[in-house]
């Protein structure tokens, strides 16, 4: 299973061929009736649905809301985890060992179960959802920061200390750059999980975001295929994940150019162009895009939440046919008696399936 | 006694945290309406344990998590093995497809299945399977591919055929990696299970927590949180012990 060097063009074609084949199959199989199109609508129908959602349902706004929450949640987690990890990893290694069992237990605390507590502490609104993402992101980040700090070349640290470097300078100049690859890896490995958790959080109680839209779309039937809206929103969510992963991977390649590329797909590290300095152009672009997103995205998200909080009957939702779509429980916590049945037919959300926060 | 001192030394931080929890509520550093004292939570768990209501939810949740994880293992490990055996060119073509599939949200899968099957058991188990299969599959693949080349060459030169090479050499070499993936997946399983049970279920720990939240029974809520955390730690401990027992002693 040795890696042969393959011309770049062939590599690109190969990479695209898998995706292309998948798209063709996705179009052809439902159209030919080999797969039930009600269950699995063809790609073109899904793309049309995405266009319709963009037009009628603020799909772009919801996408920005979800993206903003993920990025803001990770940034929030990193702001706490990086200093804490640096202190524990470098200045207090004994304490880090002692605290490890506690961290492992706290990492298993389920954020959904604490939603009510978060709401009590932070009020209804964006904060509670951000805390959920930050909570889930925090533990793997902390783990990677401590590991990264402890793997920094000891001679570097000794040299810096012998020159009388102040702790703050040591942190900024040596510990942070030294642990950065590990930190980025921590973010990249947990990004799928974070997105999934966020979408669940938005489904369980939110007024905006792709999770909310997914929840909405599952009660909404567009002809001719029942599940098209779900596929459309699902495709958007997965593309966000793919895009975030790709950006993070490119950042790793650009900034840590001295690292051999590890791939789960090939034993030998892939050949790479030799650089002598990090490529910072892309990183700066990403950073500015992130800042823009944090500022503008936050504003747009709160605006969208407000419209959804007060909107009624936008895009009148047809009554689900009695074809046995067991809907979801409506999240009307105000009337627990209305039940956690989960199996009862859904009252048609013509008044919008807006989920109120917890009382 | 020796074991006890060892344990208490190791878990000093945990014990300190629990004491701090109790103290901070008792001395009203934290509003007891937000966070109940630990003793109250433990008392609630004790009462529930006697009536058996808790055990019922716990067992149902455990069954779902274990079922989902088992299906993910049964499907994921062979998939990883198959992928590792394919030619490099094919793997290059397939990688983006799998990468994309792994980004498909379990809750999207949940919604699609719910339309056709309702929110029954298979639907909840399918979420967990979907979430767990990716870490298991990728860790299997990675373990097989990164197996020590010298050992594999030696085995080949002894004339092992593909099947025996896989079962006798590659799988034992990949075992630590597969175990890591499975432990990660088990964590995911619990996380997604609770969310799935909150979304549509009439039993299980997630449902218990959901009703506690809806009726604002904060003690019951924290009891659920505590049980899930302990459950996760216990599961992880069992898995690492099983790994030590099953794994090849020569392979670290």
Image (spheres, coloured by chain):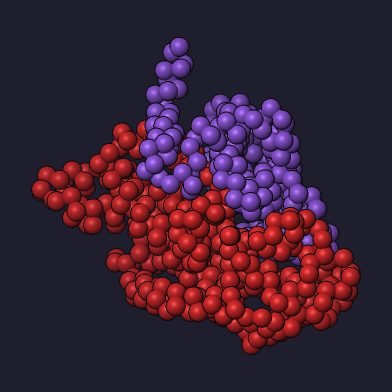
Chain colours: A red, B purple
Image quadrant where residue B105 sits: bottom right
The x, y position of residue A130, in whole percent, is: 47, 62
Front-most of A299 and A241? A299
Seen in the picture, residue A86 relative to B42 is either above or below; the reply is below
Q: Residue furthest bottom?
A: A55
Q: Residue furthest top?
A: B1
Residue at the spot x=22%, y=57% of the render? Answer: A173
Residue at the spot x=39%, y=35% of the render? Answer: B23
Residue at the spot x=66%, y=33% of the render? Answer: B48
The x, y position of residue B180, in whole percent, is: 56, 41
Front-most of B114 and B22? B22
**Number of numbered discs on residues:** 0
In screen coordinates, is B15 left or right of B99? left
Q: Is residue B87 visible?
A: yes
In screen coordinates, is A176 left or right of B192? left
Image quarter where the N terminus of chain B lies is top left
The x, y position of residue B94, in whole percent, is: 65, 63
Q: Is residue A144 visible?
A: no
Image quadrant where residue A99 sits: top left
The x, y position of residue B84, in whole percent, is: 64, 51
Residue at the spot x=59%, y=50% of the render? Answer: B216
Front-most of A286 and B31? B31
């Amino acid at each position: 299973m040795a890696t042969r060097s393959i011309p770049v063009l062939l590599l690109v074609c190969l990479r695209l061929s898998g995706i292309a084949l998948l798209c063709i199959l996705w179009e052809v199989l439902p159209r030919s009736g080999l797969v039930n199109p009600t269950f699995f609508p063809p790609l073109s129908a899904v793309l049309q649905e995405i266009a319709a959602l963009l037009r009628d349902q603020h799909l772009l706004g919801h996408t920005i809301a979800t993206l903003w929450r993920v990025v803001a949640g990770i940034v929030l987690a990193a702001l706490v985890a990086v200093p804490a990890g640096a202190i524990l990893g470098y200045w207090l290694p004994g304490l880090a060992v002692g605290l490890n069992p506690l961290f492992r237990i706290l990492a298993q605390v389920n954020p959904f179960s604490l939603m009510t507590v978060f709401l009590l502490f932070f009020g209804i609104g964006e904060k509670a959802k951000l805390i959920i993402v930050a909570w889930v992101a925090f533990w793997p980040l902390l783990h990677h920061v401590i590991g990264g700090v402890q793997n920094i070349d000891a001679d570097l640290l000794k040299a810096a200390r012998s020159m009388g470097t102040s702790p703050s300078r040591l942190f900024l100049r040596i510990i942070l750059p030294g642990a950065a690859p590990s930190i980025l890896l921590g973010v990249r490995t947990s990004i799928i999980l974070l997105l999934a958790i966020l979408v669940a959080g938005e489904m369980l109680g939110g007024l905006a975001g792709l999770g909310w839209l997914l929840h909405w779309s599952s009660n909404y039937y567009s002809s001719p295929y029942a599940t098209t809206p779900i596929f459309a929103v699902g495709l958007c969510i997965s593309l966000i994940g793919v895009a975030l992963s790709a950006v993070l991977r490119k950042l790793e390649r650009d900034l840590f150019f001295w690292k051999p590329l590890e791939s789960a797909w090939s034993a030998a590290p892939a050949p790479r162009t030799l650089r002598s300095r990090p490529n910072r152009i892309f990183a700066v672009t990403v950073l500015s895009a992130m800042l823009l997103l944090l500022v503008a995205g936050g504003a747009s998200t709160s605006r969208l939440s407000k419209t959804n909080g007060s909107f009624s009957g936008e895009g009148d939702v047809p009554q689900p046919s009695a074809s046995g779509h067991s809907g979801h429980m409506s999240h009307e916590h105000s009337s627990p008696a209305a039940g956690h049945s989960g199996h009862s037919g859904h009252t048609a959300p013509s008044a919008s399936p807006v989920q109120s926060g917890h009382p | 006694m020796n074991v006890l001192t060892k344990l208490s030394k190791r878990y000093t931080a945990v014990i300190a945290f629990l004491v701090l929890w109790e103290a901070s509520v008792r001395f009203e550093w934290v509003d007891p309406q937000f966070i109940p004292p630990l003793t109250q939570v433990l008392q609630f768990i004790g009462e529930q344990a006697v009536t058996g209501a808790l055990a019922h939810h716990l067992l149902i949740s455990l069954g779902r998590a274990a079922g989902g994880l088992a299906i993910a293992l049964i499907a994921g490990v062979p998939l990883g093995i198959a992928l590792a055996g394919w030619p490099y060119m094919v793997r290059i073509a397939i990688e983006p497809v799998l990468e994309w599939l792994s980004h498909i949200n379990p809750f999207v899968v949940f919604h699609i299945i719910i339309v056709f099957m309702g929110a029954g058991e298979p639907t909840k188990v399918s979420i967990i399977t979907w979430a767990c299969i990716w870490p298991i599959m990728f860790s299997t693949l990675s373990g097989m591919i990164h197996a020590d080349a010298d050992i594999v060459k030696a085995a080949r030169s002894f004339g092992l055929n593909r099947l025996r090479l896989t079962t006798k050499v590659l799988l034992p070499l990949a075992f630590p990696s597969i175990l890591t993936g499975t432990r990660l997946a088990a964590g995911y399983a619990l996380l997604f299970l609770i969310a799935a049970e909150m979304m549509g279920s009439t039993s299980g720990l997630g449902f218990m927590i959901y009703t506690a939240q809806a009726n604002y029974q904060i003690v019951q809520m924290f009891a659920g949180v505590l049980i899930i955390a302990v459950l996760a730690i216990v599961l992880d401990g069992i898995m690492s012990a099983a790994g030590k027992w099953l794994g090849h002693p020569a392979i670290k």
